[in-house]
Amino acid sequence: MGSFKNLNSEEVDTLCRHKRFMFIKKGEFIIREGSYAKGVYCVKSGHFKLTAQGGGGRETIIRFASPGDLIGYRALLAEDPLSVSVSAVADAAACFVPKDTLLSFLDNNGPFSLELLRQTSHELSETNKLLTSLAQKKVQERLAEVLLMLQAKFGNDDNGSINVDLKRQELAELVGTATESLIRLLSQFEKNGIIFRLGKRFKILDHKQLLQISTILD
C-alpha cells in the first residue's frame, strides 16, 4: 500500500490490528473540509476527488486520489484543519489508519518517513505544474491537457471512453474556464475529430493531436 511497503514485519502486524477497511459508495464523503484529521486514508480501489469551497459556496476539484495514495496526512502532520473535502468518484474502498499508529511509524521508521516526504514533494510539484498551466497556457491547451490527464488517471471503459463521469461545471473548473467556454471548445474538438461524445463521457479519437494542442509535444 504505497508508503506502507517500507514497514517491517512488526509494524505490519501493528497496521493490520489497527487499520479499518471500508467501502465507500459513489458520492459519499470520507473527509469534510474544516475538520481535523483523526488518521489517514489509503486508497485500495476506485478513485476519490478532493474538492475545496470556492466563492459562492461552489466546490472546485483540486486533484484526484488513486489506489495506493494516502489522503489527509499533510493536515494531520501539520495539525491544521483539512483544506479539502474528499468523496468517492464511483464506488471505492479504502483503509483508515489512526493518527497514533501513523505517528509511531514516522517516529521509528526512517524509510517510511522518507517515502511520505517524497509523496508530499510530488504532490506539491503537481500543484505547481497545475498553477503554471493555468497561468501560462491557453484554454484549449489546458483542456487538451486535462483530457489526457483524466485518461491517464481513470483509463477507458468498455466503449473506449474516459472512465469517469464529471459534470461540465467540474470539468470547466479543472480547466480553469467558464462552463460556456468549455462547452464550445468540446464541440470544436468533436467537430475536428479529436474526441467523440458517448453519453456523458468522451472518447479520445486523436491522441497525438491532443498531445500537440497541449504542447506536451513540440
Image: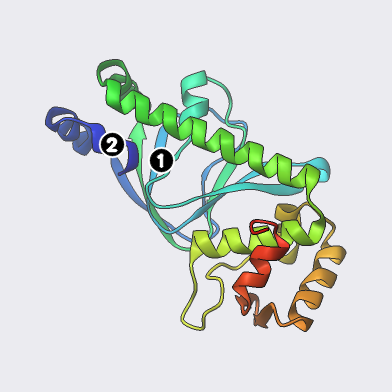
Q: What secondary structure is found at the residue carrying circle 2?
A: helix
Tell which of 40 and 65 is nearer to you: 65
Tell which of 167 and 18 is nearer to you: 167
Tell which of 123 and 16 is nearer to you: 123
Q: Which quarter of the picture shows residue 125?
A: top right
Name which residue lies at 36% across and 25% down.
114
Residue 170 percent coordinates (x, y): 71, 58
Q: In which quarter of the image is the N terminus?
A: top left
Q: Distance between the residues labelled 1 and 2?
A: 12 Å
* 201 to 132, vertically: above or below: below
Name which residue lies at 20% across and 38% down.
16
Q: Residue furthest top?
A: 107
Q: Residue 41 carries which label?
A: 1
Q: Residue 184 carries which label?
A: none
**Earlier-in-chain disc, 1 versus 2:** 2
Residue 167 percent coordinates (x, y): 69, 65
Q: Can residue 33 be seen in this view?
A: yes
Identify which amino acid the numbered label 2 is placed on: Phe
Name which residue lies at 67% across and 71% down.
209
Q: Disc 2 designates what residue?
A: 4
Q: In which quarter of the image is the C terminus?
A: bottom right
Identify which amino acid the numbered label 1 is placed on: Tyr
